[in-house]
Image: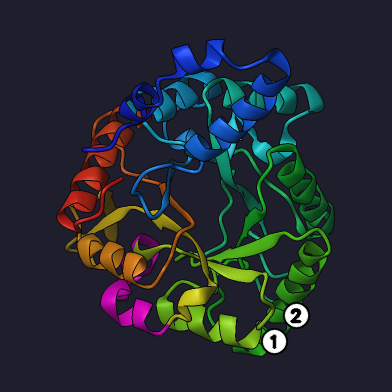
Amino acid sequence: MAYTRRRALAGLGLAGLWAAIPSLAKKAAASSLMGRLAAGAGTCPFRLAVINDEITQDFEKACQIVSGDFGLYWIELRSMWNKNVTALDAKQVEDARKILEEHKLRVTDIASPLFKMDWPEAPRSSQSETRDQFHADFDASAQDKLLERCISLCKSFNTDRIRCFDYWRLDDPKPYRAAINAKLRQAAERCARDNIILLLENEMSCNTSTGEESAAVLKAIPNRNFMLNWDPGNAAAIGSTPYPSGYELLPKERIGHCHCKDVVSKPDHKYDWAPVGGGMVDWVGQLQALQRDGFHYGLSLETHWRGAGTPEASTRISMDGLKKTLTKAGISC
């Protein structure tokens, strides 16, 4: 790409400038400089990021790749060191903070597993997952405590966003939708007390999976700090057309984060993941629309594709695909 992290740093002429700054001013200058760099100084309209555990559970290595190899300023936190981010102890949180600071990375959001479970008042969902979800397994009784933990992590990692879901997909969610919405609204109200945004991800295994369903939930829950983690790949995986059909229905000012992955259809009417640009999602059109509509929050690569053999190798190929797709869209990042 034309604009890179290394070129940005080189162009600042830091060495000579730094020598002339008194020691007391250096701390303030460093904070301001790193803030501008971490904000993605340059022309990229998005906070281009990667979900850390899509690369490796070795958090320091993931940060080195995101910052040094990909040239990014942002990262999304989900699990590390074989623990969900919400399960990290105090020392591990501090260690992670130091690693982020070392690699000059900021956190887009806490990619929590909040409400990724069965709705307790309904029959068990046919979509209910019995496997561990990114080193997290929290039952209904733990959700309020989990939300408080996520709020605490937002403060520790200096972010204002928490990702959540709306329970495993029910065969018929209509009898329970109002109660589910009430729970989401309650969580958003709790987040608002700490100026935190709650991001609902559309997830094919949960009750909100498509653009149509996302628009309906956003209408039912008008809280300004309740926003959408738009995932076109997830919508495509359930057979929907995320762009333009689903996207056109969304209130653009309510999109607070975006996950980037791609999907291919299989003969048995199922799906498989693909590197970005290699599937059915019109990512060129979607990225152009996001830029046109003023979206400027996190755009996180969540490839899920493992066709290159390892998570790291697959994510490298998918990131290359994402950057090429951004170029095709006429967006410099």
**Position of residue 260 in the picture relative to residue 217 (left or right):** left
* Residue shown at 35% from the left, 82% from the top: 248
Label annotation for residue 281: none
Residue bearing mark 2: 182
Q: Within the magenta stretch, is there residue 267?
A: no
* Label 1: which secondary element: helix
Locate residue 191: give its quadrant: bottom right
Rendered location of residue 245, percent (x, y): 30, 81
Q: Main secondary structure of the magenta part?
A: helix
Q: Is residue 198 above or below residue 101?
A: below
Q: CA distance from mark 2 to mark 1?
A: 6 Å
**Position of residue 314 in the picture relative to residue 224 (left or right):** left
Q: Is residue 267 above or below residue 215?
A: above
What is the span of residues highlighted in magenta in the rendered image? 233-249
**Position of residue 166 in the picture relative to residue 7 (left or right):** right
Residue 133 visible = no
* Residue shown at 66% from the left, 83% from the top: 222
Dot 2 alpha-carbon crowd within 10 angstroms: few under 14, some 14 to 19, many 20 or more: few
Label annotation for residue 178: 1
Dot 1 alpha-carbon crowd within 10 angstroms: few under 14, some 14 to 19, many 20 or more: few
Residue 96 visible = yes
As shown in the figure, which amino acid type bears the numbered disc 1?
Ala
Q: Can you say which quadrant of the picture contains the N terminus?
A: top left
As shown in the figure, which amino acid type bears the numbered disc 2?
Ala
* Residue shown at 25% from the left, 54% from the top: 331
Are the residues tagged 2 and 1 within 8 Å (C-beta)? yes
Rendered location of residue 22, percent (x, y): 67, 15
**Position of residue 285 in the picture relative to residue 61 (left or right):** left
